[in-house]
Image: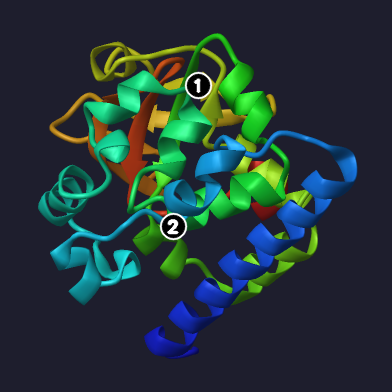
Amino acid sequence: MKSSKVLKGMLALAAISMVAAACGDDKEAGSTTVAPAESVAPDTTVAPTDTAAVTPSSEICDTDALVAAVQGGNADGTLEGMANDPVATAASNNPVLTTLVAAITAAGLGDTLNGAEALTVFAPTDCAFAALDPATLEAALADPRGLLTTVLGFHVIPERLSAAELATMTELTTFTGEVLEIDAGGSSISIGGDQATVLVPDIQTANATVYLIDNVMLPPSVTG
């Protein structure tokens, strides 16, 4: 197993390379990035709070620390501020979703997510990506429009669902058509056959309800 320090370094380099590759695609194809052009730099890097400056977001893993980091950061990325923008743009302002935003950009899914009428998004935090198996991460990065899109799509439901609504369900159909198991009957919400647990529920954006989760989930088409 690689050390935590090495893995975090790999993730940081991976995120930079994904953003660079995506920016190159945008220049060639003229596509729209997740955030408006004039705000790409501040929105995707997100000015850190004093706490985040000491503790990298890849180490902010528990619910209280996540909420503190989000609420202490960019006003557009707070729980209240995210409600003003469509989901991909809202995520780009959130200080604990930087790796997810880089992956969305690399996969070319920003416009798709922003343009959807209603979504539920289970959003892995930077800490969740830091815990992802390095071999799986490398394979996804090597295939951004294939494997990476498949994995990201497993975290998106094409309807808007509250935590109360999730509590009545046992499975959901994802953006890519795969079945996502859910157990929301107790005090916590477990998804993906216990692959991940919701840490912060019911975050509202202009077109989606977002749930911050503690692990990146792999769909049956990848694991089976």
**Residue 185 drawn above or below residue 69:** above
Q: In the displayed structure, does residue 9 sit left or right of residue 107?
A: left
Q: Secondary structure at mark 1?
A: strand
Residue 21: % across, % down: 75, 60
Q: Secondary structure at mark 2?
A: helix
Residue that sits furthest to the front in the current view: 38
Q: Earlier in the sequence, mark 1 or mark 2?
A: 2
Residue 119 is marked as: none
> For the point 48% across and 22% down, which residue is it?
86
Mark 1: amino acid: Leu
Q: How many neighbours does mark 1 have within 10 angstroms: few (below 14), some (14-19), or many (20 or more)?
A: some
Q: In the displayed structure, does residue 161 sit left or right of residue 64?
A: right
> For the point 78% across and 65% down, which residue is it?
142
The reply to whether the C-beta atoms of the residues labelled 1 and 2 are less than 8 Å apart is no
Q: Quadrant of residue 29?
A: top right
**Residue 92 drawn above or below residue 135:** above
Residue 172 is marked as: 1
Mark 1 or 2: the one toward you: 2
> For the point 37% across and 29% down, which residue is it?
210
> For the point 60% across and 15% down, which residue is it?
116
Q: Nearer the viewer, residue 176 or 66?
A: 66
Residue 45 is marked as: 2
Q: How many neighbours does mark 2 have within 10 angstroms: few (below 14), some (14-19), or many (20 or more)?
A: few
Residue 181: % across, % down: 46, 31
Mark 2: amino acid: Thr
Q: Nearer the viewer, residue 182 or 74?
A: 74
Number of numbered discs overlaid on the protein picture: 2
Q: Is residue 116 visible?
A: yes
